[in-house]
Image (cartoon, rainbow, N blue to C red):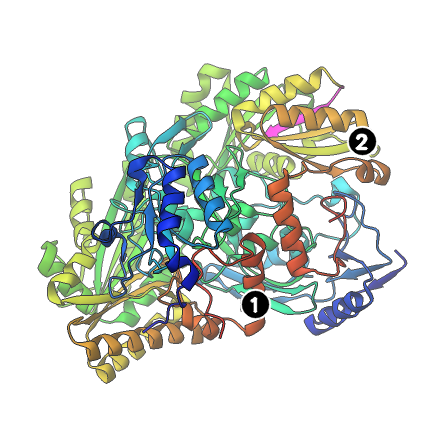
């Protein structure tokens, strides 16, 4: 279990006064302090951890966020930012003495400009909401985390979220142009804009993925892109993880950059097929979904090359989709993967390490050995193009020992990722979940240097102080 | 700057910085020093150069990564990538001619300056492809961030903070980059767009079309002539497999014909033209002239040009769909102020890329940050370089 910092006794003692102070700053319905109404904010996508906050505020404007943060700073109150609460690493987990700043009411799209290809949106707009707003005009916002129906762009910025298509289009950080960000001191920082390059230090890059440690983002300028003419997928099934991995190498080596390149192992194939009936090959050890874009003729040309490469790796089956509908069917199982695992196991932990792609067969072998040793099942989903591995560890939350083993198993997997020259987290963030593993990846001096940056933005350590950095002893 | 330190190892660089910090003696941080005429002059008794800490550490083509020491000349890296059919995604410019530099740019220099070329508009900037760094901070400590994998959100992203920090926070010693397969071929649609407004409209149409345009520049007549093209021209580049390039350039030529007579430049001509655009050759900057880069939202490029036309006889051209204005003109405070005014009025940024030392010492070479950000800049600088020994004053006076 992960230790949370002790609540500040003076803050708990002054609860009434703090809530009254917040009510003075915000509209009446924007401050929540009744325990029953605080309940929905006690956890996020890492539901094994729960903690009721001191209060929740739901501001509707940047100035309100600034006023709340200035107040919290003046009163030494800790603050936890929250979007949709979909974080899988506990990024939105409250503290007993913290005010949760929920950004879901800041959900407007402020500007869309097709000539300059950007949109200005508030943090509570959902990821899919941006694409939905510009799709009728043939544009899209590229990063597409699995939770894109629910997750909000503010959280995407906080976690530097990825998705299945970042091999070609990059992650959140690569698709932002500007931010409005409020510091704990209540200053409103205007960073970047609709232009692509800025001078000075890259605050945009530093704040993106900083997990709410540096400030609260209240406005986001994203790059939007013209949608390709079309996209189609191939489903290829193989006899072993090694062969599938070699096939991935051959595809990249041929000069093709597929827009997505997804890998599933045998347990993942079976779980997804049982759930989605997508026609996945149950006799395969590993399966790839490879997607390409372009005009119909270009798709044909690329799919032809990919088919030829796959055939050199003795596939069990090879299905080239002939239409957008067939592609959708191929993706259906993969996109429903988390739900599928949820059906066969009462609970699961979704891990998120990244590894050099060449180490995949070795890492999967080691994970299988650990699975035996811990007595817990695991299914592996892998963004094969970029090395981001998602082992789904199945356990039963009603059995404390099973949860303890699942956490230890997960930690061992992440340490293994670091050992093979990868990293603890590819797109979910450190949060509370991986906080205490940070020393596996960084030296004490490196963590201290990151903490100094945190201190430069948040001298009193009031913003999300229980996340990312191991607690000071 | 009489004495140059050029250690061959990271330990040597760390020792030099630790010593300078203990004495409070500023260091000018260089690779090969090719961009020493960029930004503000640094007052330092000694130069610390990374040029002898060089060499490719590894190149894993199938994992799309290369790692090299900071002093490695950029051409060495480009050649290693080319041997495996790959390239640098952000297409960093080779500014040695612009600076009259005798030695090539280093990897560390291009990352510290965060310079990107035409492909930036479609595929991202140099900062988007820095996967990992090793740095010696102003404290003399070695710090790593990122690594060798393409997706990594573990801890704060110091890779982006160091990229473009101009050697003011630490000395880069090792850099890992994402690279991509070089496209099989390339072609360019050239549209005779007489004025900037028409040119930028054509480029917006090109970038808003589903053909993956990877370069979008507009050259006024004089700039076009300098690189052997006749008349003002909007250029839209496609890079892909041969069949796709043939299909897309033809489609694009048809769609852009409404902006002016449109033709397709073949592979050889296309490569030549974009290399010239990348390296700012259409500017034709004379040795005594100053050079600026202004970054605005693309549709405002023409407004910057119009504003400058009233101030001085500027040489210029547009890249990044109109969002990057390259400018050359008189190396004086008056012209600089006009550039800064035009950039500010268009809601963008400027950078004094080249100029005589007195000018660079006298003006804001990049926009000053407003106070809340300036305060954070000072605190972050202090966090990395408490003695203020690394490139003091290079970005902002007093920092």
Question: Label 1's element?
Answer: helix
Could you tell me which quadrant the N terminus of chain B lies in? bottom right
Q: Is residue B193 above or below residue A185?
A: above
Would residue A36 appear left or right of B180 to someone viewing this image? left
Q: Picture quarter containing residue B328?
A: top right
Chain part drawn in magenta: B312-318
Q: Which residue is mark 2?
A: B289
Q: Residue at x 54, y 73 (%)?
A: A443
Q: Closer to the camera: disc 1 or disc 2?
A: 1
For mark 2, name the chain. Answer: B
Residue A341 position, x and y percent, is: 16, 63
Residue A256 position, x and y percent, is: 38, 51
The disc label shown at residue B220, or none? none
Assess whether residue B251 is covered by the magenta stretch. Answer: no
Q: Which residue is mark 1?
A: A448
For mark 1, name the chain. Answer: A
Residue A88 position, x and y percent, is: 30, 59
Query: Badge 1: how crowded within 10 Å, few (<14), some, or many (20+)?
Result: some
The residue lying toward the viewer, choosing from A387 and A177, is: A177
Q: Residue at x 63, y 18 (%)?
A: B231
Tell me how far mark 1 sits from mark 2, CA to CA: 45 Å
């Amino acid at each position: 279990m992960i230790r949370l910092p002790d609540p500040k006794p003076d803050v708990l003692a002054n609860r009434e006064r703090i809530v009254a102070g917040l009510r003075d700053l915000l509209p009446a319905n924007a401050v929540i302090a009744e325990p029953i109404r605080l309940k929905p904010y006690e956890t996020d996508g890492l539901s094994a951890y729960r903690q009721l906050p001191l209060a929740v505020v739901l501001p509707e404007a940047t100035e309100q966020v600034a006023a709340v943060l200035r107040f919290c700073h003046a009163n030494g109150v800790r603050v936890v930012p929250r979007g949709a609460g979909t974080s899988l690493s506990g990024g939105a987990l409250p503290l007993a003495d913290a005010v949760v700043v929920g950004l879901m009411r800041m959900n407007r799209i402020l500007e869309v400009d097709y000539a300059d290809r950007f949109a200005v949106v508030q943090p509570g707009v959902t990821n899919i909401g941006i694409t939905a707003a510009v799709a009728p005009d043939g544009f899209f916002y590229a990063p597409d985390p699995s939770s894109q129906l629910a997750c909000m762009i503010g959280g995407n910025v906080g976690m530097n979220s990825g998705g299945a298509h970042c091999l070609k289009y990059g992650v959140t950080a690569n698709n932002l142009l500007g931010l409005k960000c409020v510091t704990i001191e209540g200053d409103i920082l205007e960073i970047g804009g609709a232009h692509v390059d800025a001078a000075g230090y890259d605050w945009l890059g530093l704040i993106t993925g900083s997990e709410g440690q540096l400030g609260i983002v209240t406005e986001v300028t994203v790059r939007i892109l013209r949608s390709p003419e079309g996209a189609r997928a191939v489903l290829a099934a193989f006899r072993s993880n090694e062969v599938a991995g070699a096939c991935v190498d051959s595809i990249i080596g041929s000069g093709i950059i597929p827009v997505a390149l997804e890998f599933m192992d045998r347990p993942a194939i079976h779980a997804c097929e049982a759930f989605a009936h997508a026609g996945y090959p149950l006799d395969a050890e590993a399966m790839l979904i490879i997607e390409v874009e372009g005009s119909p003729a270009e798709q044909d040309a690329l799919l032809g090359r990919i088919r030829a490469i796959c055939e050199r790796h003795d596939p069990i089956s090879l299905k080239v989709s002939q239409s957008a509908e067939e592609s959708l069917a191929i993706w259906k199982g993969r996109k429903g993967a988390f739900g599928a695992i949820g059906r066969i196991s009462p609970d699961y932990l979704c891990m998120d390490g990244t590894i050099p792609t060449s180490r995949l067969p070795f890492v999967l072998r080691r994970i299988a050995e650990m699975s035996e040793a811990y007595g817990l099942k695991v299914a592996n989903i892998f963004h094969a193009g970029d090395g981001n591995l998602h082992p789904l560890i199945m356990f039963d939350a009603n059995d404390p020992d099973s949860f303890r083993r699942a956490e230890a198993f997960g930690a061992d997997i992440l340490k293994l990722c670091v050992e093979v020259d990868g990293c603890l987290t590819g797109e979910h963030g450190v949060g509370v979940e991986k906080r205490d593993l940070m020393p596996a990846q960084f030296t004490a001096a490196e963590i201290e240097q990151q903490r100094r940056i945190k201190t430069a933005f948040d001298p009193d350590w009031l913003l999300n102080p229980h996340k990312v950095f191991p607690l000071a002893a | 700057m009489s004495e140059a330190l050029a250690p061959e190892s990271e330990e040597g660089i760390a020792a030099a910085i630790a010593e300078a910090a203990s004495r409070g003696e500023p260091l000018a941080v260089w690779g090969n020093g090719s961009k020493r005429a960029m930004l503000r002059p640094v007052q330092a008794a000694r130069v610390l150069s990374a040029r002898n800490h060089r060499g490719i550490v590894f190149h894993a083509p199938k994992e799309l990564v290369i790692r090299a020491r900071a002093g490695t000349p950029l051409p060495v890296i480009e050649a290693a990538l080319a041997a495996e059919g790959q390239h640098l995604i952000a297409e960093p410019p080779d500014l040695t001619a612009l600076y009259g530099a005798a030695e090539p740019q280093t990897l560390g220099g291009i990352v510290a300056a965060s310079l990107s070329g035409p492909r930036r508009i479609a595929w991202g900037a140099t900062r988007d492809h820095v996967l990992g760094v090793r740095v010696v901070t102003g404290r003399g400590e070695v710090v790593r961030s990122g690594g060798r994998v393409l997706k990594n959100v573990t801890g704060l992203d110091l890779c982006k903070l160091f990229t473009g920090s101009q050697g003011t926070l630490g000395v880069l010693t090792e850099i890992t980059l994402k690279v991509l397969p070089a496209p099989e071929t390339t072609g360019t649609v050239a549209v005779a767009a007489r004025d900037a407004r028409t040119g930028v409209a054509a480029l917006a149409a090109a970038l808003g079309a589903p053909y993956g345009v990877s370069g979008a520049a507009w050259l006024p007549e004089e700039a076009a002539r300098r690189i052997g093209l006749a008349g003002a021209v909007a250029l839209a580049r496609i890079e892909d497999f041969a069949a796709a390039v043939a299909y897309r350039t033809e489609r694009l030529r048809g769609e852009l014909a409404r902006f002016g007579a449109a033709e397709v430049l073949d592979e050889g001509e296309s490569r030549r033209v974009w290399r010239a655009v990348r390296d700012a050759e259409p500017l034709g900057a004379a040795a005594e002239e100053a050079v600026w880069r202004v970054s605005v939202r693309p549709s405002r490029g023409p407004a910057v040009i119009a504003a400058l036309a009233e101030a001085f006889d500027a040489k210029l051209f547009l890249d990044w769909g109109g969002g990057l204005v390259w400018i050359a003109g008189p190396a004086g405070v008056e012209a600089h102020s006009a550039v800064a005014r035009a950039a500010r009025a268009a809601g963008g940024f400027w950078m004094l890329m080249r100029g005589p030392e007195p000018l660079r010492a006298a003006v804001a070479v990049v926009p000053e940050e407003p106070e809340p950000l300036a305060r954070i800049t000072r605190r972050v600088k202090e966090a990395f370089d408490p003695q203020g020994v690394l490139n003091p004053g290079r970005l902002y006076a007093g920092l």
